[in-house]
Structure formats: structure tokens, C-alpha cells
């Protein structure tokens, strides 16, 4: 008999409820009295638990041995529930204990655990209500990302994880080497001899698929990459990971206005998909974490604010609010500014654009004022920056000049310059951090709690 997942079992139509079915899962709780026993079971397919009803003496004996966390398998049938809170319960005809979970050893007991405690048992935390919900929402978002782009004809392009270029030019890359670190070969000049390394030159884990995404967009039109990216920045914050997932669309024959529109439609679509496809999870987050479903639904429907960097700085300065770092034209917008702007000044997501060129990457298109670049960040309440993107500098001379000014060596990026030498076109794109999006919709406050295996400075479990 094929196993029916609990989500499917709870959603089956009445006509199926006489048939015998098989279910399996982990025991959440049990209540056993002399003649009847109730066991709640979850199998990860849904936020909900299935209530098992046991009344035969031989089954009650087995039920009695079950503990929180025990894995079981049962056959029986669904019947209308007399209890409150659920439509169906499962009348057990056969019950097998698959794996015990001794109460004095199993760390996940019924009582609520702190997220910090759960982080230390990352291999077990997915069995809790919170993390089950987080990972199901994460799955919906990932699927929805693909649907959104596929429906519009964007081509999913697989950009590499091992790379020889530094996209953000920020030097925050993990080196990849097979050199013997105890005895690093040197050149006559005393530098590391990368010719003897695996690839014959320095290699790194990618910080972004953008540069490769650009050459694919400049051939296929609209593309997106979606995969893990790595940053060796030493920032131990609740919004940064050393390994995170980023989705990066890139569009040819398009500029900043189209980029902003795509970003807005994209985030709105992700929100409405999660609200539609994970109602139970979202109810749970609203109840136990800081998220308001009505607010989210509104955000999915109303246009985002658009504001130039210059105006944003001026509005922050005029706000009269005391910041740790005073907002100043030419300086980076700090998280505290991002949050104040979106939470207090605007009260909804805001797209900030046209940043000073000195605080942005070399590839962003220089605006006619000669001072700003056509970059954009999407900021959302509670999180701050969720998307970063730009129109790319597609004019050969302007790009070479920018690279020289910023000390980005052109010899490593001749291929990138080729895109501007041959058949260059205006193009643009952005990157959305998947984890920031999961945080945004779930209300989880620490980015380490929205990815199964978080990596951060000084911390790598598994
Ligand atoms: O703003 P970033 O650095 O932009 C880029 O990497 C561009 N190459 C994207 C592009 O135009 N194709 O990163 C984009 C997004 C951020 O807005 C943020 O959501 C997320 O990636 N992000 C991080 N998420 C978690 N941990 C980190 N350390 C992150 N760094 C960036
Ligand atoms: Mg950014």
C-alpha cells in the first residue's frame, strides 16, 4: 500500500475516506487512557498534525511505548473527527514503531525551545513547527522564482560557482586552491605561484553570477541565474551569511525603469504566491512571529515608492531622527537608514536609485551628471536591502575609464569588455537574496534561521 502524505490525506475528498491508507511520521504528542489513545503525528508535508485514534488493546500497548519524536507507520482509515480543530482523524488498524526517541536523550521535547538552542541542533530543528514552516515557505519561494521568470520567457542560465573573476570587486572572495598550504610554492619574486595551482591561476567561489549572466543575456535576451553565492565578508550580523542563495535576472535592451518594474512585479508575485500556497504556515508565522498578513497582501498589490538616492539622503537628514551614522551625500546608506526610510518615512517598500558612483561597483552605468550611477536597491521594512541591481555600463570607453579609476584590472576582464566591443546593447539586472526574502515574508529575525545549513564567520556545522 502506497504511503499517503499527511497533507494529501487531510486534503482528500470524502469519497476516499473509507479506503484503507498508510501514513508515516514523527510523533508530536500522545494522550493515552485505558480504552482509547490519541497520537498526533507530523510528516513534514504540512504544518498540520494528523490525529491518530487507537482503541484496540494490542495497539494501545504499542501506543503506550511511543514518545515525542518516535517515528511510526500506521495503516487505517480517515474518519470525520469529533475533536475540535481538525476535520479528519485517522483510525488506526495497524501500528509499527520504526524508531524510538528516548525522552531523556531526545533534545526536542514538547516545550518551546529558543531559536538559539535549535541552531545548535541544526540536524533536528527541521522537525519543529517553526523550521518545518520556514523550509516549506522557502521551497514555495524557490519554485515561484522559477515560475515567475519562466512564464515571461526568461532562460535559466547556470553560471559557475568556481570563478576567476571578482564580480563585486570588493575582494570578499573565498579562495579555492589545491596548493599545499603548509608549503606554498613561490615565484622568484616571492609571491604565491598560482601557475602550480589547480587551474593555473587564482580561483574563487563566486560572489555573484552577474558577469557571466551578462554575456548570456547579451545573446539570449532575458536570462536568470539562481544558485548559491559566497561572501567572505567578516560581518557577523542577522542579515549576512557567508553562503546564501541569490537569483539574478539580466535583461538585454532594457534600462533602469524596466529593471525597477521587474523587481517590483517579482517581489509582489513571490508574496502573493506564498500567501496563496502556504496559508497554514503564514497563519503560524503571524501568530508566533512578527509578520502581518494583511500588510503583506497590501504590499503585493500597491506600487513601491521610487526615490533617488539624493532625495533619500535629504529626507533622512530632514527627519530629525538621530542616527548612529549621520546620513550624508556620498556615504553608503546604512541599515539603520534603510529601515528608517522604508518603515518611518515611506511605510512600504522603496526603490532607491542613482547612487553616487564612488560607493557602487565598477559595472554600473554612469549617469549624465557624471556623479551618479544607474544603480538601484529595493528596501523593505524590517530587513532593509533585499535587492541590489543596476543598468550596466555598456559603452566601451566609459567602462574602461571606470575600471581604471576604480583600480579594476582590465586584463582579467577582456571577455567582459568584448561584450562592449562587439554588438553592445543596453542591459540591466539585479540580485535578490533568497534568505532576505524568506525573512521578509516569515518575520524571522535572524538570517541563520531561514537556511538549513547557515555559514557565517567562525561558524560551519555539517
Ligand atoms: O547588492 P548585491 O551585492 O548585488 C550583486 O551581487 C549584484 N551582482 C546583483 C546583480 O545586479 N546581478 O547582492 C544582491 C542581494 C542583496 O540585495 C541581498 O539581498 C543579498 O543579495 N545579499 C546577501 N544575502 C545574505 N548574505 C549576504 N552576505 C548577502 N550579500 C548580499
Ligand atoms: Mg547591495
Image (cartoon, helix red, strand yellow):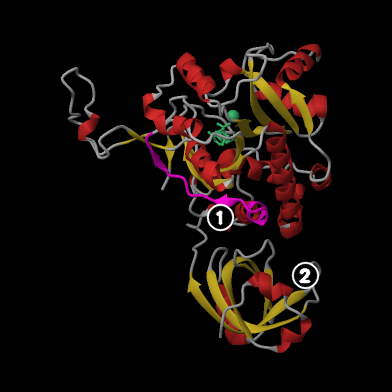
Q: CB of residue at label 1: within 8 Å of ligand 1?
A: no
Count of labels shown? 2
Q: Quick check: can you spot residue 130?
A: no
Q: Residues within 10 Å of mark 2 (few under 14, many from 20)?
A: some
Q: Is residue 444 above or below residue 339?
A: below
Q: CA distance from mark 2 to mark 1?
A: 23 Å
Ligand 1 lies under 8 Å from the Cβ of mark 2: no
Which disc number belongs to residue 126?
Answer: 1
Mark 1 crowdedness (10 Å alpha carbons): few <14, some 14-19, many ≥20:
some
Q: In screen coordinates, is 173 left or right of 58?
A: left
Q: Secondary structure at mark 1?
A: helix
**At 54% from the left edge and 24% from the top edge, which residue is drawn?**
361
Q: Earlier in the sequence, mark 2 or mark 1?
A: 2
Question: Which quadrant of the render holds ligand 2?
Answer: top right
Residue 60 among those drawn in magenta = no
State whether residue 347 is above or below residue 63. above
Q: Residue at x 73, y 73 (%)?
A: 11
Residue under label 2: 86
Q: Which residue reaches farthest front? A: 423
Q: Residue at x 76, y 14 (%)?
A: 314
Q: Residue 449 occupies which quadrant of the picture?
A: top right
> Toward which corner of the image does residue 46 lie, by quadrant?
bottom right
What range of the chain is rendered magenta? 147-164
As helix, strand or loop, the secondary structure at mark 2 comes to loop
Image position, residue 76 (x, y; %) = 64, 84
Amino acid at each position: 500500500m502506497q504511503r499517503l502524505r499527511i497533507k494529501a490525506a487531510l486534503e482528500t475528498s470524502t469519497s476516499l475516506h473509507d479506503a484503507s491508507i498508510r501514513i508515516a511520521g514523527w510523533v508530536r504528542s500522545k494522550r493515552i487512557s485505558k480504552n482509547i489513545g490519541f497520537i498526533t503525528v507530523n510528516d513534514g508535508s504540512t504544518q498540520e498534525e494528523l490525529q491518530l485514534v487507537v482503541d484496540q488493546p494490542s495497539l494501545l500497548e504499542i501506543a503506550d511505548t511511543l514518545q515525542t519524536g518516535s517515528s511510526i507507520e500506521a495503516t487505517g482509515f480517515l474518519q470525520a473527527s469529533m475533536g475540535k480543530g481538525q476535520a479528519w482523524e485517522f483510525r488506526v488498524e495497524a501500528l509499527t514503531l520504526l524508531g524510538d526517541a528516548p525522552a531523556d536523550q531526545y533534545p526536542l521535547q514538547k516545550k518551546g525551545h529558543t531559536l538559539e538552542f535549535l541552531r545548535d541542533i541544526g540536524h533536528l530543528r527541521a522537525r519543529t513547527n517553526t523550521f518545518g514552516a520556514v523550509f516549506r515557505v522557502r521551497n514555495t519561494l524557490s519554485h515561484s522564482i522559477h515560475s515567475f521568470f519562466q512564464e515571461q520567457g526568461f532562460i535559466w542560465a547556470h553560471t559557475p560557482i568556481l570563478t576567476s573573476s571578482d564580480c563585486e570587486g570588493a575582494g570578499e572572495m573565498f579562495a579555492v586552491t589545491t596548493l599545499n598550504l603548509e608549503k606554498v610554492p613561490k615565484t622568484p619574486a616571492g609571491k604565491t605561484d598560482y601557475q602550480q595551482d589547480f587551474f593555473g591561476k587564482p580561483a574563487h567561489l563566486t560572489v555573484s553570477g552577474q558577469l557571466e549572466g551578462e554575456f548570456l543575456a547579451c545573446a539570449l535576451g532575458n536570462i536568470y541565474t539562481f544558485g548559491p553565492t559566497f561572501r567572505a565578508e567578516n560581518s557577523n550580523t542577522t542579515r549576512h551569511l557567508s553562503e546564501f542563495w541569490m537569483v539574478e535576472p539580466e535583461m538585454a535592451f532594457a534600462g533602469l525603469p524596466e529593471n525597477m518594474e521587474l523587481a517590483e512585479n517579482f517581489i509582489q508575485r513571490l508574496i502573493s504566491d506564498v500567501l496563496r500556497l502556504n496559508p497554514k504556515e503564514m497563519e503560524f508565522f503571524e501568530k508566533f512571529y512578527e509578520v502581518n498578513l494583511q500588510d503583506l497582501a497590501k504590499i503585493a498589490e500597491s506600487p513601491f515608492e521610487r526615490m533617488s538616492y539624493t532625495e533619500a539622503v535629504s529626507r533622512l537628514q530632514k527627519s530629525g531622527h538621530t542616527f548612529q551614522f549621520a546620513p550624508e551625500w556620498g556615504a553608503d546608506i546604512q541599515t539603520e537608514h534603510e529601515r528608517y526610510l522604508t518603515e518611518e518615512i515611506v511605510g512600504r517598500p522603496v526603490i532607491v536609485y542613482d547612487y553616487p558612483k564612488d560607493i557602487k561597483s565598477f559595472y554600473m552605468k554612469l549617469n549624465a551628471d557624471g556623479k551618479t550611477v544607474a544603480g538601484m536597491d529595493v528596501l523593505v521594512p524590517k530587513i532593509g536591502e533585499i535587492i541590489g541591481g543596476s543598468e550596466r555600463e555598456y559603452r566601451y570607453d566609459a567602462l574602461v575609464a571606470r575600471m581604471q579609476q576604480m583600480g579594476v584590472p582590465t586584463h582579467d576582464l577582456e571577455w567582459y569588455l568584448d561584450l562592449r566591443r562587439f554588438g553592445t546593447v543596453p542591459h540591466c539586472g539585479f540580485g535578490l537574496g533568497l534568505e532576505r526574502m524568506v525573512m521578509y515574508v516569515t518575520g524571522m529575525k535572524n538570517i541563520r534561521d531561514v537556511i538549513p545549513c547557515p555559514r557565517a564567520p567562525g561558524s560551519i556545522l555539517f
